[in-house]
Amino acid sequence: MATLPYVTSPGSIDRALAGIKQAAVPERVSQDFVKTILKIPGGSGDQMTSFLKKIGFTSADGSPSDLYKRFRNPAQSGRAVASAIRNAYAPLYLRNEFMDTLSEEALLGLVTEETGQAHDSGPVKLVCACIKHLKTFADFSRLSEPISSDSPSTSSNYLPARSPTETPISQQAFGLNLGYTINLNLPATSDPEVFNAIFKSLKEHLLRPSDA
C-alpha cells in the first residue's frame, strides 16, 4: 500500500502555488520561504515545505526543481502541475490510467483501495482534497502536445519539419568509390621494353577510363 502525499490544510496548496508564481525563484524553498514569502504559517507551512518536495517541485536539498521553474512559465504552468500529479500519485494511475478524470466518488474509492484505509478516514479524504486542489492548476490535455519551438524539446519523438525543397533521404543519390592495390613481381631485367610491355598491358586491361 502506497503512502500518498497530502497536507491537512488542502486550501494552502492554492496559496502556495499562487505565491510561487509571484515570488522570485529562491535558492532554497525553506520553511522560512514558505512561511514568510508564501505566507503559510505554523504547522501548515511545515507540511507545505515537505509537500512541495513530494510532488517534485523541490529537490532533496530544497532547491527549486525544473518542474518548479516550468510552473512559473505561463506557457508551461498547467502541464507542470499535471506532471507533478502524475508523478506524486503514480500508484493511483497504475490502478486507473485516467485517474485525473474520475468523479469525486470514484476517486475516493480508488484512494481507499490504494491506501487500505476506510473510505471516511481523514487521510483518504485529505488525499482526495489535495488532488482536487492541484487539478485546478493542471492542464492534462496538453501533456501529449509537442513543446513549442521557443522551449527546449523533451520529447524523443519530436522531429523538426523538413524543408519543402529538401530531398528525402530515401531519394538521395550516393556515390561509391572503390580503390585497389596491385602488387607486381617484376622480372630481373634491365631491358626497358619488358617494363613498357608490362605497364602497357596494365593500362589497357586494368586502368580503363571507365574505371576512373
Image (tube, rainbow, N blue to C red):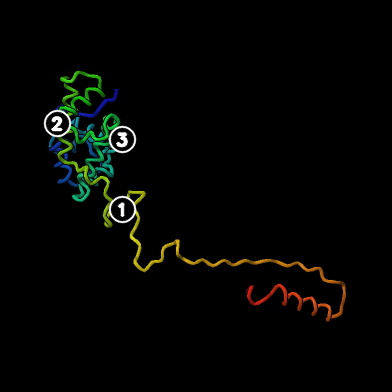
In the image, residue 176 sits, relative to residue 123, either above or below, namely below
Q: What residue type is labelled 2?
A: Pro
Viewer-nearest of discs 2 and 3: 2
The reply to whether residue 53 is in sight is: no
Pick whichever of labels 2 and 3 is earlier in the sequence. 2
Q: Mark 1 points at which residue?
A: 152
Q: Position of residue 61 (x, y in %)?
A: 30, 36
The local secondary structure at tag 2 comes to loop
How packed mark 2 is, by other alpha carbons closer than 10 Å (few <14, some 14-19, many 20 or more), is many
Q: Mark 2 points at which residue?
A: 10
Q: Where is residue 70 in the image (x, y as percent from the top left)?
A: 24, 47
Q: Mark 3 points at which residue?
A: 60
In the image, residue 145 sits, relative to residue 61, either above or below, namely below
| Callouts 2 and 1 close, C-beta under 8 Å | no
- Position of the C terminus, as image quadrant, is bottom right
**Residue at image point 22% right, 42% down:** 140
Structural distance between the alpha carbons of marks 3 and 1: 24 Å
Q: Position of residue 180 (x, y in %)?
A: 67, 66
